[in-house]
Every structure is written in structure tokens, then in C-alpha cells.
Image (tube, grey):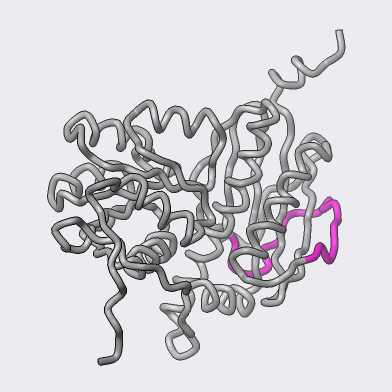
């Protein structure tokens, strides 16, 4: 996976997490994931079509998701687990939407054109296998509210690869 | 949250907003901000189709509209609302802020664009700008009396 595709997501996650959670963030770990994706907690999936194709999963362990939801919503959901779960799912989807939207804005300004689907809650315990063509990169962001994982599997579309191929 | 002077209509009534976003969380977040500006939530919608019917039902002073939504996207909904109500004040609120999206929204009749994550001070200035002479500033009403 090309760094030019990844860097906007790192920048966007860093900026959006710091702004929305009012804390500094740092990348704790970056790894390629050769195995099947395994959900860690509350996860949101965004699919991309166009010059770049693939998907991004935003994944937060349940306790961190509840803390983030409380921080963002300005309420403590400690006594209402069901409302807390719903808000945690909503929060993860909206965080994913903001991070990915911001990254896509930067990529679009670099000349890549594509569409994103609205984030959906990723319920399955596992996801599709990554492949040589579309390997997944997993980043763990350490925030003051806990760890946030971003699993990115993107590739150039066939048409874009043709455009980029040297003559 | 930072305290802003209230933004109200020049007839001193609260500005009535229709908030459109497929994320309940995002709607509540924006609603909380505009209420802190002295506004009133006239309606909410989770997609473009519902936004059109809600606009007809509640006749808001301003629509705060997301772009990426299921069923009908915000830009198409904005176009349809403005076609039926040329005076509609629609502000697009989206995480996807690249230029062609903004230009498309403005061409279809949106008045302004705010990128997510929404900053209260930016939303406040945009609302003030879009309402123009139809809004005035007033001191917030003291709470807890």
C-alpha cells in the first residue's frame, strides 16, 4: 500500500481525535495485518469506490468507546448500558466519518476522485482476508481516552493504475 | 461550551433550525451548539427525502445539512428544497470538504459550507453571515433563576 494513500488518514485521525477528544494523540503502533481482520470492540466500516478502492475500519474497544461517547456527548452513560451502547456505536461511526471525510478531502485535493458510503456499524467478529493486492495496515492511536484502531485496506483502481503506469 | 451572544431573528423570536444528518450523534451535537446560540430545533431528519418533507412541514429559518447520507444525499436534497423554496437558507455541514463538493453544493443553492468536526465559533459566524440582516445579536438569558 502506498504511503501517499496512508498519510492523509494519519494526519486526519491525529487532527480529528485531538480536536474532538481535547487531548494529544500519538501513534502507538503500526503493523501490516496478514491475518483476517478481527474486531476489537465497537467498529465502523466505510467503503470507498473510485480512483482508490477499499475499506477502512475504525475500531475502539468497548470501554474506550463508552468513555469517548461520554466525552463527546457530555453525558455519563454508566447507569444506562443500552443507551450507552447505542451512543458508543453512533460515536464511533461519526468519528470514522469525520476522520475519513477529512482524509478523503486531502486525497481529492491531490487529484484522486472517489465516493464514500456512509459509515456502517461493523458487527461481524471478523472481516475479509487481506490480500497481496489489498493488504491491510493497522494503526493504533493512543489518546487520553484509550486506544483507537484504524484498519486500512486500499488500492488504486485498475483504471488509476493504468494512468499511473510509466509510458 | 463557550458562551456566545444569542443570535435571534429581528422579530426577536428564536431562529428555527432543521438539522439533517444520518448520524443521531452528529444531529445532537449540532443541535446542542445552535441551542447554545439561542436557536430552536424545529425538526430533524436522517436523510435527504425526510429533509424535504420536514422542510415543508416546519418551514425552518435555516437548514444545517450533511452531504453523505443514505437514500438521498444532502446536495440533491438541498437542490430540491431550493427549487421549491428559493429563499431557503441551507448550510452544508460535512466531513467531506473538497472543493468540487463545496462548489456543487453552492451551485445547487446552498448558502455556505462548514466542515466537520464542527467548531462552535465557525458555525456561529456562518449562521450570522447567512442570516444577514434577518438576525440580530442579543444577550443570553441568565439560567437557573
Residue A1 visible in the snapshot: no
Residue at point 58% right, 52% down? A45
Counting from the top left corner in percent of width and height, residue B1 is at 47, 74
Residue at point 81% right, 62% down? A27
Counting from the top left corner in percent of width and height, residue A50 is at 61, 28
In front here: B60 or B134?
A: B134
Counting from the top left corner in percent of width and height, residue A84 is at 47, 78
Please say if B108 is above or below A24.
above
Please say if B25 is above or below A103.
below
The image quadrant where one finds the N terminus of chain A is top right
Residue A82 visible in the snapshot: yes
- What is the count of numbered marks? 0
Left or right relative to B140: residue A98: right
In front here: B131 or B75?
A: B131
Please say if B65 is above or below B38.
above
Counting from the top left corner in percent of width and height, residue A165 is at 83, 16
Q: Was residue A38 drawn as part of the magenta stretch in this picture?
A: yes
The image quadrant where one finds the C terminus of chain A is top right
Q: Was residue A6 drawn as part of the magenta stretch in this picture?
A: no
Choose top left, top right, bottom left or bottom right for residue B81: top left
Left or right relative to A163: residue B16: left
Magenta residues, as a range? A26-43
Amino acid at each position: 500500500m502506498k504511503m501517499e494513500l496512508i498519510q492523509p488518514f494519519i494526519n486526519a485521525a491525529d487532527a480529528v481525535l485531538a480536536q474532538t477528544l481535547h487531548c494529544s494523540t500519538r501513534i502507538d503502533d503500526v503493523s501490516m495485518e496478514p491475518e483476517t481482520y478481527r474486531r476489537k470492540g465497537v467498529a465502523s466500516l466505510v467503503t470507498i469506490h473510485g480512483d482508490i478502492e477499499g475499506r477502512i475500519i475504525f475500531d475502539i474497544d468497548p470501554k474506550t468507546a463508552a468513555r469517548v461517547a461520554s466525552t463527546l456527548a457530555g453525558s455519563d452513560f454508566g447507569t444506562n448500558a443500552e443507551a450507552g451502547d447505542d451512543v458508543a456505536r453512533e460515536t464511533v461511526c461519526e468519528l470514522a466519518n469525520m476522520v475519513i471525510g477529512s482524509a478523503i478531502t486531502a486525497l481529492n485535493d491531490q487529484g484522486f476522485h472517489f465516493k464514500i458510503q456512509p459509515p456502517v456499524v461493523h458487527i461481524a467478529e471478523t472481516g475479509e482476508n487481506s490480500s497481496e493486492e489489498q493488504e491491510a495496515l493497522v494503526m493504533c492511536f493512543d489518546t487520553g481516552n484509550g486506544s483507537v484502531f484504524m484498519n486500512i485496506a486500499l488500492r488504486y483502481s485498475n483504471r488509476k493504475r493504468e494512468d499511473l503506469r510509466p509510458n | 461550551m463557550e458562551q456566545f451572544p444569542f443570535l435571534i431573528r429581528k422579530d426577536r423570536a428564536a431562529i428555527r433550525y432543521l438539522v439533517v444528518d444520518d448520524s443521531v450523534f452528529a444531529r445532537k451535537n449540532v443541535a446542542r451548539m445552535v441551542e447554545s446560540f439561542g436557536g430552536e430545533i424545529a425538526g430533524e431528519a436522517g436523510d435527504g427525502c425526510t429533509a424535504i418533507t420536514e422542510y415543508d412541514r416546519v418551514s425552518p429559518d435555516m437548514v444545517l445539512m450533511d452531504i453523505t447520507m443514505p437514500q438521498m444525499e444532502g446536495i440533491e436534497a438541498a437542490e430540491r428544497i431550493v427549487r421549491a423554496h428559493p429563499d431557503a437558507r441551507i448550510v452544508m455541514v460535512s466531513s467531506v470538504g473538497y472543493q468540487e463538493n463545496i462548489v456543487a453544493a453552492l451551485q445547487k443553492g446552498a448558502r455556505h459550507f462548514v466542515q466537520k468536526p464542527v467548531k462552535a465559533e465557525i458555525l456561529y459566524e456562518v449562521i450570522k453571515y447567512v442570516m444577514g440582516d434577518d438576525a440580530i445579536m442579543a444577550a443570553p438569558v441568565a439560567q437557573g433563576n
